[in-house]
Amino acid sequence: MSYPGYPPNNQSNPTLRPANPFDAHRDAEILRKAMKGFGTDEKAIIQVLAHRVNSQRQEIAQQFKTMYGKDLISDLKSELSGKFKDLIVALMTPTNDFLAKEIQNAVSGIGTNEETIIEIICTASNAEINNIKMAYHKLFGNDLEKELMGETSGSFRRLLVSLCQGKRNENTFVDVASAQSDAQNLLQAGELQFGTDESTFNMILCSRSFPQLQQVFLEYHRLTGRDFEDVVKSEFSGDIENGLRAIVKSVRDKSSYFAKRLNESMAGFGTNDRALIRIVSTRCEIDMVEIKNAYLSMYGKSLEADIASDTMDDTSGDYKKCLIALVVG
């Protein structure tokens, strides 16, 4: 039986791979020269930083400080401006620190940006969750779980607390009998009763492995003929619906989820540059090839073409050039 979204297409396929050969000393010299004297050589900055992975950029920053007694990020901040500066600072920040800062930004100030929290927390592996939690505590001195509890409520809060444990089963073995039982329990908790028992959805979607959940969705479809994401849409609303759907999409095809997020960041009037920078700067080292393929098949246009047309107000063109360099590889 064929079923949409299977098999999943979540393999690692980055556009940005470690530079080889790599010489942090030489790169530090190039960056110093690019920022020394009158004017800044943005092209040289892009040539180095958009073609090194995050761990290599950290080595360059260390080398820069050793050679010149100066902080590379501080120098870059003082030389650059606008969205290009934001993108370069994102590239220079260790990934876990960067994502922790993005969550902190989402929970600080007036209102909470639930979309950002969902994008980061609901798609993360156990290791990613635990690394972000450690980075959050190191940077802000606070417990990420407690922060999220203070900013959210109800079933959405419970979903985030469950995911923050970083204890999802990550075995690749699929137990079909268990998946059939879970599908039956989900049916009983949703469609077959008045109201929804959200705790059953929470327990299954936050604890089962991704391969196991694929089987659960398949068994649910066999039982009811309904797509599981449609069931979530009909049973839930608001942030909990969006959170659960993000998990379902990640289980099926994470690259399609991020392709949709990128399209949403550029759709309509204005650009959500923060989301665009976050997704491009982090996913280019993970699965950007798959995201680009998904984007093309979903929207009939290449991701780089949409980035080029959406960043028209980028007067210098450096922001656009750097984003496209990361997407093209």
Image (spheres, helix red, strand yellow):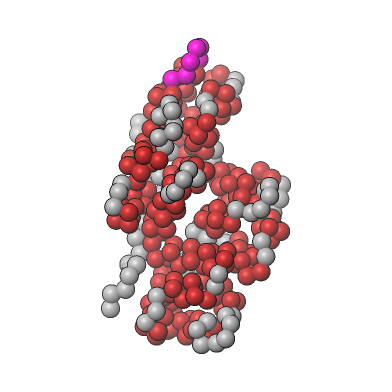
Q: Quadrant of the C terminus?
A: top left
- Residue extending furthest top? 37
- In the foreground, 61 or 85: 85
Task: Identify the image quadrant of residue 243.
Answer: bottom right
Whole-percent x, y for residue 218 in the image: 38, 77
Q: Residue furthest front?
A: 269
Residue 130 pos. (x, y %): 58, 55
Is 253 included in the stretch rendered in magenta?
Answer: no
Q: Looking at the image, is 252 positioned above or below residue 134?
A: below
Above or below 296: residue 237:
below
Instruction: Work out whether 296 lies above or below 211.
Output: above
Q: Residue at x 44, y 32 (%)?
A: 314
The answer to whether residue 36 of the structure is visible from this angle is yes
Does the magenta stretch mainly form a helix, a strand or a loop?
loop
Quadrant of the snapshot with the N terminus: bottom left
Residue that appears at 47% across and 39% down: 54
Res. 127 in view: no
Q: How many marks?
A: 0
Instruction: Judge from the rendering whether residue 70 lies leftward or rightward of residue 230; answer left or right.
Output: right
The answer to which of 68 and 321 lies nearer the viewer is 321
Q: Residue 258, image x and y in percent?
A: 42, 54
What's the residue at 42%, 58% (across, down)? 257
Looking at the image, which is closer to me, 132 or 235? 235
Answer with left or right where residue 67 lies relative to residue 140.
left
User: As rendered, which of 208 and 5 lies closer to the eye?
Assistant: 5
Q: Residue at x 34, y 60 (%)?
A: 9
Q: What residue range appears in magenta? A: 36-41
Is residue 111 found left or right of 230 in the rendered image? Answer: right
Residue 79 lies, with reference to residue 243, above or below; the image says above
Q: Quadrant of residue 202?
A: bottom right
> Picture quarter containing residue 166?
bottom right
